[in-house]
Image (cartoon, rainbow, N blue to C red):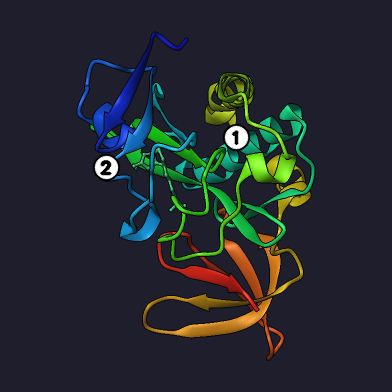
């Protein structure tokens, strides 16, 4: 299904590059560094040339999928499974789609829809060679796969594992079934049954995270016994 693979020494952002190529349905773009790497919620994704993975895939669904809001969760699970295939143990997903290892961020996922809307660019950033020096300006606690595994990372092998997981997951996504997916999600759900604080920008909520609701939103049990669900667009979550 993948038609083209483009690898650049340097780009502003692999997501931005694919978004600007309307004829590259099913294209892949990788860069050794990004000068304007983007994270979720308008943040910068520090993207030095130090052996990390900056990867984007443009995918075209035949129609706008019914469960589009769950796509990021599906991509997260594919990356977690690919890391397992590569030999890592202990990776977790922090809802909606941060990749964590022992409480530190190992990677992130940024989805951007293109025009027409059934096209999406899936961006994956993974710290596979982030030196202390290169990562000094990152404003979250982070970790690096080569440090964790005590060996240099074969990025080609890891990216191949990601594609082996991701492409079948995307092909199956139009028939997405949330009850089935919930079981898969639970295996990687780092926040499950943990105390969390959810910030919506206007309000701050505290409670116990308890998995996904029927739309793939994060469910939080509040102190008064009620449950509230949060969509990924509206909130940032941290473990307490
Ligand atoms: C996040 O956790 O905030 C998401 C980070 C996503 C980073 C990747 S790196 C490849 C692709 N290109 C970008 O500019 N961002 C994504």
> In the image, what residue occupies the spot 37% across and 17% down?
27
Q: Is mark 1 within 8 Å of ligand 1?
A: no
Secondary structure beneath dot 2 equals loop
Secondary structure beneath dot 1 equals loop
Q: Are marks 2 and 1 in contact (CB under 8 Å)?
A: no
Q: Farthest residue in the bottom direction?
A: 224
Is 30 rendered above or below residue 91? above
> Where on the image, by quarter, is ligand 1?
top left
Query: Which label belongs to residue 98?
Result: none
* Residues packed near mark 1 inside 10 Å, few (<14), some (14 to 19) or many (20 plus): some
Q: Nearer the viewer, residue 101 or 219?
A: 101
Q: Give the x, y percent position of residue 74.
A: 59, 39
Q: Farthest residue in the front direction?
A: 133
Q: Give the x, y percent position of residue 91.
A: 72, 47
Query: Which label belongs to residue 176?
Result: 1
> In the image, what residue occupies the spot 22% across and 22% down?
21
* Disc 2 from disc 1: Cα separation: 35 Å
* Residues packed near mark 2 inside 10 Å, few (<14), some (14 to 19) or many (20 plus): some
For disc 2, the marked residue is 35
Would residue 130 appear left or right of 202 to someone viewing this image?
A: right
Q: Given this view, does label 2 or label 1 mark the residue nearer the observer?
A: 2
Q: Nearer the viewer, residue 229 or 30?
A: 30
Say which quarter of the image contains residue 194. Answer: bottom right
Q: Give the x, y percent position of residue 34.
A: 32, 38
């Amino acid at each position: 299904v993948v038609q083209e693979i483009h690898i650049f020494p340097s780009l502003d952002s692999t997501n931005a590059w694919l978004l600007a190529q309307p004829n590259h349905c099913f294209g892949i773009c990788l860069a050794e560094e990004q000068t304007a790497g983007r994270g979720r919620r308008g943040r910068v994704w520090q993207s030095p040339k130090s052996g990390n993975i900056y990867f984007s895939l443009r995918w075209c669904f035949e129609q706008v999928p019914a469960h589009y809001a769950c796509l990021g969760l599906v991509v997260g699970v594919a990356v977690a499974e690919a890391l397992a295939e590569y030999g890592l143990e202990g990776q977790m997903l922090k809802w909606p789609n941060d990749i964590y290892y022992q409480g530190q961020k190992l990677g992130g996922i940024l989805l951007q829809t293109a025009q027409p809307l059934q096209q999406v660019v899936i961006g994956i950033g993974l710290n596979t060679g982030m030196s202390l020096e290169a990562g000094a300006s990152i404003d979250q606690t982070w970790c690096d796969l080569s440090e964790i595994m005590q060996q240099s990372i074969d990025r080609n092998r890891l990216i191949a594992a990601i594609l082996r997981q991701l492409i079948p997951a995307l092909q199956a996504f139009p028939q997405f079934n949330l009850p089935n997916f919930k079981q898969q999600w639970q295996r990687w759900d780092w926040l499950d049954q943990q105390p969390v604080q959810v910030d919506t920008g206007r309000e701050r909520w505290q409670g116990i995270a308890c998995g996904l609701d029927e739309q793939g939103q994060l469910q939080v049990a509040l102190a008064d016994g009620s449950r509230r669900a949060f969509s990924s667009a509206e909130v940032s979550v941290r473990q307490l």
